[in-house]
């Protein structure tokens, strides 16, 4: 049995190494084509080759970030990346110099959570009116008909500053003399947001007990890690997964 596991592990490492080597070779080949086209003044062809080289280089870059994500934790298993032709199959920069790498996790042993007792009133909370016979509670919309969809977690590692600003603001507000009050909007009573520490890094924890979703966002050097859960019973797995990220890898790839 140990031999089978070892062979499978070696096969996985070989495939990952071969894939990265292949992508690196493709990037180099397209850069060479771009140079040839520039010399020949075929500028449109040069741009196409440059775009292809950039595409392969971004994949190599983001694959380095995936290494920081655990393969499995508490029954939650990292799903294979989407096929190349799929919408999420190839992470692309969100802006000049920005990268983003995402993986999803699933736990087949978990059942769909039940809607909260007050979920049927959420849709009408803002007006104070009772839900009509045809109204679908927001907590049930994800898993039509009725109930929630399967529990899922998404982990994203990026160097985009938008999420980082939110975390930094939450910690700054928590340390101020007049912190902002908790969200008390009608129908949003289940939402809680708290600045926390994850592996000694500043983080922001959010969870909605009514809608059964939440997130943990962490700032680590120039990297930002966001762990998002949908249709889960507790925020605990989000915090645990966030703590399982290899932050040394994140900072080595994205910088201090």
Image: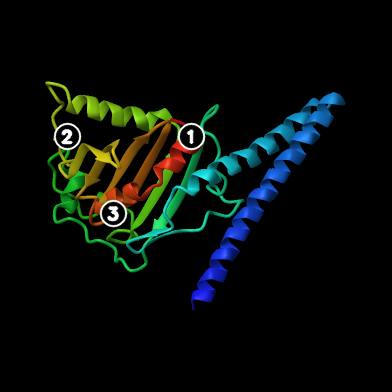
Circle 3 — which element? helix
Q: Is residue 96 left or right of residue 152?
A: right
Residue to which mark 1 is pinned: 254
Query: Counting residues from the N terminus, which is met first, the one under dot 2 or under dot 1?
Result: 2
Q: Sort mark 3 into few (<14), some (14-19) or many (20+) by Cα contacts within 10 Å.
A: some
Q: Does dot 2 land on a helix, a strand or a loop?
A: loop
Report, in whole angstroms, how far the alpha carbon at label 2 lies from the one at label 1.
34 Å
User: Which residue, given by chain and number where applicable, does mark 2 sit on?
Assistant: 183
N-term mark: 3 or 1: 3
Q: Quadrant of the C terminus?
A: top left
Q: Residue at x 52, y 47 (%)?
A: 88
Q: Nearer the viewer, mark 2 or mark 3?
A: 3
Q: In the rendering, at what x and y percent does residue 138 appear?
A: 26, 49
User: Can you see residue 135?
Assistant: no
Give the image location of residue 243, x and y in percent.
32, 47
Instruction: Give coordinates of residue 75: x percent, y percent.
Output: 35, 64
Residue nearest the observer in this picture, 212 or 193: 193
Q: Which residue is mark 3?
A: 237
Residue 28 is drawn in which quadrant? top right
- How many circles with numbers are drawn on the protein? 3
Q: Residue at x 57, y 51 (%)?
A: 86
**In the image, farthest residue toward the top:** 177
3 vs 1, front mark: 1
Image position of 125 with respect to 117: above or below: above
As rendered, which of 175 and 92 lies closer to the eye?
Answer: 175
């Amino acid at each position: 049995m140990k031999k089978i596991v070892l062979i499978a592990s070696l096969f996985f490492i070989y495939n990952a190494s071969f894939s990265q080597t292949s992508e690196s070779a493709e990037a180099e080949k397209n850069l060479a084509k771009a140079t040839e086209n520039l010399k020949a003044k075929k500028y449109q062809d040069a741009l196409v080759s440059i775009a292809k080289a950039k595409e392969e280089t971004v994949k190599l870059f983001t694959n380095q970030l995936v290494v920081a994500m655990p393969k499995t934790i508490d029954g939650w298993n990292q799903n294979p990346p989407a096929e190349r032709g799929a919408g999420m199959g190839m992470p692309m920069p969100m802006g000049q110099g920005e990268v983003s790498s995402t993986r999803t996790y699933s736990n087949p042993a978990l059942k769909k959570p039940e809607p909260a007792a007050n979920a049927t009133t959420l849709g009408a909370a803002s007006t104070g009116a009772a839900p009509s016979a045809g109204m679908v509670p927001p907590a049930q919309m994800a898993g039509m008909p009725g109930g929630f969809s399967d529990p899922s977690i998404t982990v994203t590692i990026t160097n985009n500053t938008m999420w980082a600003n939110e975390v930094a603001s939450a910690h700054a507000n928590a340390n101020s003399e007049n912190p902002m009050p908790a969200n008390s909007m009608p129908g949003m009573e289940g939402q809680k947001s708290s600045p926390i520490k994850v592996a000694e890094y500043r983080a922001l924890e959010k969870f909605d007990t009514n809608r059964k979703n939440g997130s943990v966002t962490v700032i680590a050097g120039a990297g930002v890690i966001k762990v998002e859960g949908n249709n889960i019973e507790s925020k605990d797995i989000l915090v645990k997964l966030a703590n399982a990220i290899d932050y040394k890898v994140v900072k080595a790839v994205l910088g201090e």
